[in-house]
Amino acid sequence: MATISALNTSELLYEEKQLYQPSLEELKEVIHSALVKNFENVTVEVTNCPDMKKPEYGLMDSGLGGSPTLVELGGPPYLLPLVQREKLYNVKEICQKTMGGGKILAVGAGAGPYPLRSSNCEGIYNMSISADGQLKNGSYTAKVSGLEESCVLEAIPDSEPRCALLLNLFVCRGEPGQVLKITCKKRTGHLNFIECIRQGLLQKYQDKCVGMGGMFKINQGKAHQHVMRDFSKTPIVDEHQLNQWLKFYEMPATLTAVGTLITHENDLDLRLQHFHSFSSSNWGGHYHFDTTPEIVEYEAYLNVAERVVRVDKPVETHKFGRD
């Protein structure tokens, strides 16, 4: 594969909007009332963030605090109907530009750096950037491998700062501080965990745009998740063709998912929710829903974002490929 360098970070279009930022205490009540319609056992509390660097969480910095920001880069129109391979981005530089330097934690869901794997792949992003610009990667790619089409999860090295095509990031200073801790057991409704939270926020705040990000774990049960196959050689033009191209798996706990949710597109052509998970085994991919409602257990740590930064928004857009 010919070497393709990342696009020039300073030449990309950046757009920024402030978000409505309710207090965590208020969000606790809103989210609790949404989740109890969908799960039998629910607790939502405002708590000091546990040390996210501990092995059971696996993030690259301790907290989810300090200028919490959503960053959305590229989008599905760069992947579908046909891939635009030149859409390769330097995530480290984009985060530094967005945050004005300093110490940074960035976690989220996107397309992995295909030149690294010589294949299209999912990206599960979990990076810390020191104030002097050192990147430490706890990120992974997940790809569909071999004739058996098995899922292969591989660590992204510290030397690889790129993503391709699209990315939804929760970016902050990695500082300790208060977060929402959410636990849910036994799903009784039809909405997935993130959609239930997002719909609850949307109903409460209506035209005010609220964004959140962070991580959740599935501690028990299994989840329906996809991994993209290698780039399609024929155009993918609707959801049916898309679902034929994606490879779906039932992935067992424990899964740790990172990503973002937002109540509105906010005139920025935003993806409303996007979480990718990794595990200590070979499993990783794009979260859709759990498949074991009777036994599923979720544990989440989320913070509310101050603003959203839109980078390289597609000029020509479409609405499929966003589930």
Image (cartoon, rainbow, N blue to C red):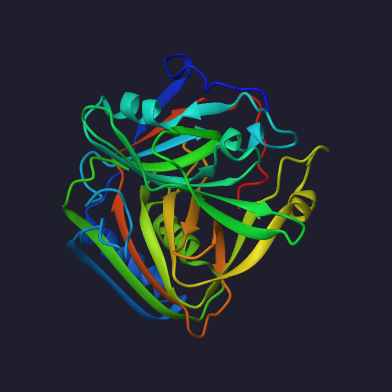
Return the x and y of residue 25 as percentages of the image width and height.
21, 61
Return the x and y of residue 186 as percentages of the image width and height.
46, 82
Q: Nearer the viewer, residue 251 or 4?
A: 4
Q: Residue furthest right?
A: 234
Q: Nearer the viewer, residue 278 or 296?
A: 278
Q: Please indicate whether residue 205 sits to the left or right of residue 252 in the image.
A: left
Return the x and y of residue 36 as percentages of the image width and height.
40, 76
Q: Please indicate whether residue 196 sits to the left or right of residue 177 in the image.
A: right
Q: Image quarter for residue 90?
A: top left
User: Considering the image in quadrants, where does the N terminus appear?
Assistant: top right
Q: Name the residue at 47% across, 66% down.
A: 193
Q: Is residue 313 visible?
A: no
Q: Name the residue at 54% across, 62% down.
A: 282
Return the x and y of residue 209 as percentages of the image width and height.
39, 44
Q: Please indicate whether residue 176 sits to the left or right of residue 78 in the image.
A: left
Vertical placement of residue 21 versus 103, above or below: below
Q: Name the residue at 57% across, 73% down.
A: 190
Vertical placement of residue 107 versus 307, above or below: below
Q: Image quarter for residue 248?
A: bottom right
Tally of marks: 0
Q: Is residue 132 visible?
A: yes
